[in-house]
Amino acid sequence: FHERSGKPYCPQDFLAMFAPKCQGCERPVTDNYLSALRGVWHPECFVCVVSGQVFASGSFFELEGRPYCELHFHQQQGSICHGCGRPVTGRCITAAGRKYHPEHFICAYCLGQLHKGTFHERGNKMYCQACHDKLFL
């Protein structure tokens, strides 16, 4: 048995009452653990909350106290490039309510790079002025 404050406890009750709880599964942490996001975690519980995948590179993103991989963090934040589907972490163009890497903000017809304010949207696609006029006027 275990003793605490002069009282005896069976091992199961002692762990349930006094061991730190895993932030992922709420079960007691008794041996190997990770310390992150203001708590302790079983190594197998510290995973992306969306995909359940471990952080192979060792890096993670935090949102509301929960761990995310880079892709799912940016999806939650709405910072995914509409052109390539990857996170936008540097320069960004926002057009028609969507975000783009500058190199992916291109005309759907000629694939030339578009510039903010000089494009037309049609059928959820972006066109340069010349291609828009050629195709739709």
Image: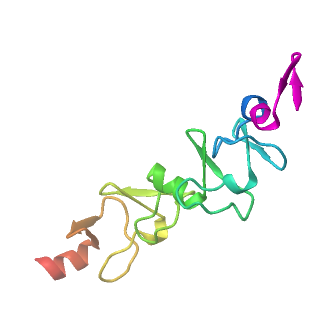
Q: Is residue 45 left or right of residue 83?
A: right
Residue 101 placement (x, y as % from top left): 48, 64
- The residue lying at 69 percent from left, 60 percent from top is 55
The region drawn magenta spans: 1-15
For the residue pair 12 and 72, the one nearer the viewer reads as 12
- The residue lying at 57 percent from left, 57 percent from top is 89
For the residue pair 108 and 35, the one nearer the viewer reads as 35
Q: In the figure, residue 119 lies in which quadrant?
A: bottom left
Residue 3 painted magenta: yes
Which part of the image, by quadrant, shows the C terminus?
Answer: bottom left
Residue 98 placement (x, y as % from top left): 36, 58
For the residue pair 40 and 93, the one nearer the viewer reads as 40
Q: Is residue 19 left or right of residue 122?
A: right
Q: In the figure, residue 10 lies in which quadrant?
A: top right
For the residue pair 134 and 25, the one nearer the viewer reads as 25
Q: In the figure, residue 8 lies in which quadrant?
A: top right
**By what rule are the colours in the image chosen?**
rainbow
Going by the picture, which residue comes out furthest to the top?
6
Q: Is residue 71 left or right of residue 61?
A: left
Residue 6 painted magenta: yes
- The residue lying at 33 percent from left, 83 percent from top is 110
